[in-house]
Every structure is written in C-alpha cells, then in structure tokens.
Image (cartoon, rainbow, N blue to C red):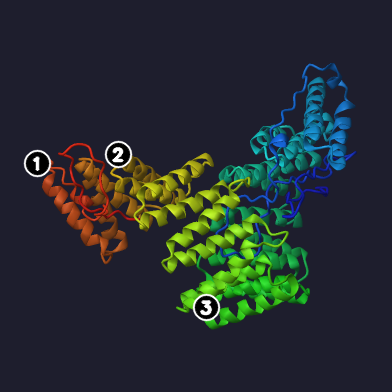
C-alpha cells in the first residue's frame, strides 16, 4: 500500500495560541487541520488523577463567542466551483491578519455551503475510484469550520460539522479518503473530549485507529503514535487494561523502527509506568521509569530526567521506601530550581510530593512547611502557568489538609480549584470530581444539606457527559447517604437503585463498593416498609460473602443479624421501626417538623 504522508494523530501543543487553522492553498488534505481543542494527555506521571479533556485556550469575550453568522443558502454564487477554495483562503487570511474569528467563520460557512452545492451537482463517483474532487474539499472545509467553532469555545456547534465530515470520505477509495476519514474521527474525538463525553470520544479515536491500520498496516510508526494517543485517553478514562494493551503495542512498534533507548521508547515507558502504578504494579512501574531515565540521560534531556525522578520518588513512596523517595524528590528539585526558577510550578509540584511524604511519615511540621511553600508559588503563578497545574496542585494540598483534620482549609482550596476550572472547556468531569470530594467533606462535618447539593451538582455534570463509570455509581451512593441524613428516604432509594445497576455492571457484585450499595439499599427498603425486597438483598449479600468472599468481614455478622430480624418480622404487621437503619442515621440529625406524631429515626449505618 502506498505511503500516506500526514496520517498521524491530531495533537496540539499545550501552549498553542487559541486559533491556528491551517488552510493550504493546494492539496487540501495533504495535512489534516490541527485543531486547538484538546491538550494531549501528558505522558509524564502525575500524582493527580487524569482527568478527561483539557484545554489551554483562553476564554473568549461574549462579543466574539456569541456572534451569529448568517449565510444566504440560496445565493447562486455558491454554485461556482472556484468559490469554495477561494473562501477557505480568505478564512485563512482573516485569521492570519487578525481580522477576527467571526470573519473566518463567515468565510468557512460559505465555503462549506459552496462545496456542498458542488458535491450535489457532481455525479456519484465510480466505486473504487481514487479521485477526491469536491468530496474531499467538502471534508476539509468541514474540518476547518469545526476548528473555528472550537477556537471560539462553541464546541457543541463543532460536533455536527465533524459528524458530517466523517460521513463524506470513503476510505475504500484510496489514501486521500482514508486520511480525511482518519482526521475527522480524531478531531471529533478531541471535540467530544472537550465536552466531557469521554466514551464517545474514545469510540471516535478507536475508529480513527482502525482506519489508519487498514491503510498503513499495524506496524507503521504513525500507527504507534496513534496507539499511544488512544492509550493516554484510556488512562484518562481509567480503563487501564485497555491502555496497557495499546501501550505494549506502541512499544513494540517503536522498538522495531527506532534505535535502542530512543526518545519515543522513553515516552512509551513513562506512560506504561503510569498504567502500572495505577494498577498497583509498582515494581514494573519502577523498571519502566529507570529505563526511560537512562534513555533521557543518554539524550541530554536534563529536565525530563528530573521529571522522571519525581515519578520514581512517587513509586518509592508507594513502596514505603521513604529515604529513597526523598533522595529522588530532592534530586529533581535541585534541577528544576536551577533550570526553571524557584517559583516555577514544577518546583511547587515537588514541594507537594515532599509534603505528602512527610505527612505519611508523621513529620507534620515539615509537611505543613512544604504545603505553604507550594501555596506561595500557586498563589503568585509565573507567566505561562496553566490553571490546570494550579488547580491540580491545590487539590492535592487540600487532601493533605483534610487528612490532618483541617477540613475548612481543605474546602477553601477545593473551592478555589473549582473556580479556576469553571470557565475552562472540557473540565466539567474534573469539576464534578472536585464537587464529589467537597460533598464527602461536608458529609463528614455533618453539613448534610451542603453535601447533598454538592453531590447533586456533580451528578448533574456527570449525567450531561454521559458518565456510566464506577465513579459515577459511587457518587450516586454518596448522594443517597446525604439524602438519608436529610430524611429524604424515597430519593435515597432511587439513587441507591441506580448506583446498584452501575456498580454491578462496572465492578461486579462482589466488589466492596457494590456490597456497600446492597447494604444501603436493604436498609432503605426496610425503612420504606419493603421488607421482602430488603430480605432478598440481604440474602444475596450473605450468600456472596459465604460462597466467594468469606465470613471474616465484620459486616457479615451485622448483616446476618439484620436479616434474622427482618425474617422474624416478615410474617406479621410492620411496626416500621426500621431496624436496618440502626447504624445509619446521625443521632444529631433532625427530621423535618411536621406533626407531633412524626416518627423519630434511629441512628444510620450506611456504607459510605
């Protein structure tokens, strides 16, 4: 099969300006448009959990982002086959000259309409033909139009053109069509990622990779780059088994086409280390990092070696090899201070790692000192620092403050992180994660109304993103607990039921989170008078523990006792004492005052 230049994954540097849409004068599809949408997931380890879709673009002013472009679709001049290419050139010139994205958007919309007219006027191509004609011009125009919408922050409006663009080319008609289809799927995946629709985003990347492999074969170096790109997306979605499989494939491809200990192989090994660390395979993670470090040392990449040293320190800390972790962190800190300056965010990130280490070893004074040093840097960021870096650092520091019983300070840091991210496209899932953490903290402080509100906001964002992960199930369970404390038992039951379905699918019935939801749901059914349903669930839980998990768990005796009480009551009138809730409700929680005969709830014991 002939070579296919330009068929690589669409990536945009983190420091890319907000609008750079390449519209070539000739051979429109020789290069796919690089869209300023998704910040490529870092292949360097990060202690913060990967979050889906990040953006480095600045928020546009309302006058720019809200302006509407009206195009007369009946304009007869749009039938001119020379008009489309000319308008695309004008769009490029408008961007380069600084006339503004709205002017470029006007030209791009008109160009697209012109290409659509020309495609409709041309007879259907001969099957198997290699010519592209106006079909490929239309695909290119749709890519550019979507990129301009994204540069304006109007990601929802970028999706329809891209969905149309992936339907236009026919990969069976040759490499040009394959390139157009591949670029469209990757660009659509990036756009959906910015909208927080991770599952749909990954599906687009998978389809793009499939087209690329069909065209280039499965050992081409460009296929390796796309495999790594998809593996990074899997890591962000916490699908680590799939990420590991693709990363291994990437390593094999790069070993076959690159020199030993190449920079490409080093990047693959750093990603593999992230995956291994996430799966708890610390020894293998350490091995990959050491090999990556050796490759970087051979290439003279001092800053990259320091970044790997931080990752090595993380692994040593996970293995409780604290002295070696301190050595790795201090080594990296020295390099970062000399090469980037003492107020650079990478210096702050190492301070956070040291703060966590000293907290774990009981040296709380040293831990607090490093937290304060990091906060000084984050509070006065140097130019070029991204809000994602600041928000991630504040979030990690908040976890340390929470663990030393300073919840109010931890909440302030989480609120500040959320405020930094709220205007950034593609950060809705990350914000939902922060709100869920705040909900947990409010709950532990007994501020149940605030906890429920935080969980509800998180659930709303996750629903909008189409989230169906185990994390979503856990958040639903936590919101249900807050509802129980507020005596909203019916609402709690609905939330536990939804959490049950999700966790059974994602984790299976034997997972501890799933078992916790079973227990919570049984207690709620008991409180609602649905004794038979509560009995059925508790019998299922006890059967799972006896047959698969063992009976050593302390919850086993409690669940067995609860079941015996329910079975005893099942044959007679229910007095609604809700004995399954004996360990659930906070004794300090007060039910809403209705009438004097209102029942008093015993204390709650849901599995949080």
Residue 393 picture location, percent across and down: 58, 62
Few, some or many residues within 10 Å of mark 2 (<14, 14–19, 20+) = some
Does the rendering let one see residue 269? no
Which element carries disc 2, helix, strand or loop?
helix
How far apart are labels 1 and 2 at the CA level?
Answer: 23 Å
Mark 1 highlights which residue? 572
Which element carries disc 3, helix, strand or loop?
helix
Image side of residue 135 versus residue 442, left or right: right
How far apart are labels 3 and 2 at the CA level?
Answer: 48 Å
Residue 470 picture location, percent across and down: 45, 51
Q: Mark 3 near mark 2, Cβ–Cβ under 8 Å?
A: no
Q: Residue at x 64, y 53 (%)?
A: 230
Residue 238 picture location, percent across and down: 54, 55
Instruction: Point out the tag, 3 or 1, that comes first from the N-terminus.
Output: 3
Mark 2 highlights which residue? 490
Q: Quadrant of residue 291?
A: bottom right
Instruction: Point out the tag, 1 or 2, that comes first from the N-terminus.
Output: 2
Image side of residue 408 versus residue 230, left or right: left
Q: Which mark is residue 538?
A: none
Q: Residue at x 73, y 64 (%)?
A: 264
Q: Please say if 351 is above or below 487.
A: below
Q: Which mark is residue 366?
A: 3
Does the rendering let one see residue 133? yes
């Amino acid at each position: 099969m002939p070579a296919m230049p330009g068929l690589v994954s669409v990536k945009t540097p983190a420091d890319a300006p907000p609008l750079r849409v390449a519209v070539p004068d000739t051979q429109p599809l020789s290069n796919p448009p690089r869209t300023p949408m998704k910040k490529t997931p870092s292949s360097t380890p990060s202690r913060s959990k990967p979050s889906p879709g990040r953006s480095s673009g600045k928020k546009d002013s309302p006058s720019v982002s809200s302006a509407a472009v009206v195009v007369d679709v009946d304009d007869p001049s749009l039938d001119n086959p020379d008009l489309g290419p000319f308008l695309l050139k004008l769009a490029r010139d408008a961007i380069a000259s600084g006339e503004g994205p709205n002017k470029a958007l006007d030209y791009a919309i008109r160009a697209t309409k012109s290409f659509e007219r020309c495609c409709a006027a041309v007879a259907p191509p001969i099957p198997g033909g290699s010519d592209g004609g106006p079909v490929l011009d239309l695909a290119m125009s749709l890519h550019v139009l979507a990129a301009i919408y994204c540069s304006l922050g109007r990601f929802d409006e970028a999706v329809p053109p891209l969905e149309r663009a992936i339907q236009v080319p026919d990969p069976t008609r040759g490499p040009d069509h394959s390139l157009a289809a591949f670029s469209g799927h990757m660009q659509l995946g990036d756009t959906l990622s910015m909208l927080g629709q991770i599952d749909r985003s990954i599906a687009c990347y998978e389809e793009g990779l499939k087209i690329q492999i069909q065209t280039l074969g499965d050992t081409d170096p460009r296929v390796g780059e796309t495999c790594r790109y998809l593996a990074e997306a899997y890591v962000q979605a916490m699908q680590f088994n799939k990420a590991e499989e693709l990363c291994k494939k990437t390593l094999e491809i790069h070993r076959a086409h690159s020199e030993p200990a190449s920079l490409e192989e080093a990047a693959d090994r750093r990603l593999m280390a992230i995956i291994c660390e996430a799966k708890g395979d610390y020894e293998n993670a350490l091995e990959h990092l050491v090999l990556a470090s050796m490759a970087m040392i051979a290439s003279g990449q001092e800053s990259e070696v320091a970044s790997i040293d931080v990752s090595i320190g993380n692994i040593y800390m996970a293995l409780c090899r604290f002295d070696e972790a301190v050595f790795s962190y201090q080594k990296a800190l020295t390099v970062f201070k000399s090469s980037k300056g003492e107020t650079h965010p990478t210096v702050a990130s190492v301070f956070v790692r040291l703060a966590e280490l000293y907290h774990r070893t009981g040296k709380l004074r040293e831990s607090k000192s490093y937290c304060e040093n990091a906060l000084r840097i984050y509070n006065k960021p140097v130019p070029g620092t991204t809000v994602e870096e600041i928000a991630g650092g504040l979030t990690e520091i908040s976890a340390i403050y929470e663990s030393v019983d300073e919840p109010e300070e931890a909440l302030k840091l989480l609120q500040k992180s959320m405020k930094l991210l709220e205007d950034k496209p593609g950060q809705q899932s990350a914000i939902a994660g922060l709100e869920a953490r705040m909900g947990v903290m409010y709950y532990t402080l007994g501020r149940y109304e605030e906890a429920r509100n935080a969980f509800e906001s998180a659930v709303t964002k996750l629903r909008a993103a189409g989230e169906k992960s185990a994390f979503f199930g856990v958040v639903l369970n936590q919101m249900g607990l807050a509802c129980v404390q507020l005596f909203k038992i019916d609402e709690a039951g609905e939330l536990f039921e939804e959490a049950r379905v999700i966790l059974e699918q994602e984790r299976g019935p034997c997972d501890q989170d799933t078992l916790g939801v079973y227990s919570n749901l049984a207690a709620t059914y008991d409180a609602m008078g649905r004794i038979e349903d509560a009995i059925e669930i508790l019998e299922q839980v006890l059967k799972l523990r006896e047959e698969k998990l063992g009976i050593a768990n302390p919850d086993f005796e409690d669940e067995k006792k609860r079941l015996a009480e329910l079975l005893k009551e099942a044959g007679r009138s229910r007095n609604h004492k809700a004995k399954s809730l004996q360990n659930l409700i906070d004794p300090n929680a007060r039910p809403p005052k209705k009438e004097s005969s209102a029942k008093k709830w015993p204390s709650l014991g849901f599995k949080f």
